[in-house]
């Protein structure tokens, strides 16, 4: 028997308005280190907001939202990760028009 770990999840996302979308994932994570094992259910959430100005969007996500996990005799939390970012079509943002592009 060898050590193993895996995670499997199911996700769902929905556009709630023409500018706002949200989604989430429920995932089952497990780790087996031959003699000891642990498992947990965790959740990820995210949103995306299209500002309507030159395709600029703002996104946010929270990952690993879960209760404490027990491993052997210790309890600990998964690392809670919060991310926020801005995305844009740089050509539209800078008003650059490209013609005669061949793919």
Image (cartoon, grey):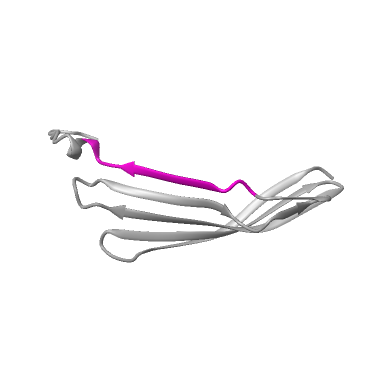
Q: Is residue 14 left or right of residue 97?
A: right
Q: Residue at x 52, y 59 (%)?
A: 25
The answer to whether 28 appears left or right of 53 in the picture is right
Q: To which quarter of the image does residue 19 belong?
A: bottom left
Left/right of residue 8 with respect to residue 22 in the rendered view: right
Residue 54 in magenta stretch: no
Vertical side of 17 occupied by 87: above or below: above
Residue 67 occupies quadrant? bottom right
32 in relation to 98, above or below: below
Q: Position of residue 96 (x, y in %)?
A: 14, 33
Write the residue at 35% across / 60% down.
Answer: 21
Q: Position of residue 69 (x, y in %)?
A: 71, 54
Q: Is the residue 41 above or below the residue 96 in the image?
A: below
- Residue at 25% over, 40% down: 89
Residue positioned 13% across, 36% down in the render: 95
Count of numbered circles in the view: 0
Magenta stretch?
A: 78-90
Side (left or right) of 19 relative to 92:
right
Q: Quadrant of the N terminus?
A: top right
- Give coordinates of residue 82: x percent, y percent: 49, 47
Residue 58, position in %: x, y? 33, 48
The residue most toward the right is 35
Image quadrant in which the C terminus is located:
top left
């Amino acid at each position: 028997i060898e050590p193993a770990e895996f995670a499997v999840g199911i996700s769902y996302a929905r556009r709630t308005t023409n500018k706002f979308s949200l989604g989430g994932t429920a995932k089952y994570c497990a780790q087996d280190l031959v003699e000891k094992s642990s498992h947990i259910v965790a959740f990820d959430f995210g949103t995306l907001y299209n500002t309507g100005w030159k395709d600029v969007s703002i996104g946010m996500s929270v990952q690993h939202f879960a209760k404490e996990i027990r491993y052997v005799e210790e309890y600990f939390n998964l690392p809670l990760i919060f991310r926020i970012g801005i995305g844009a079509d740089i050509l539209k943002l800078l008003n650059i028009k490209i013609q005669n592009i061949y793919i």
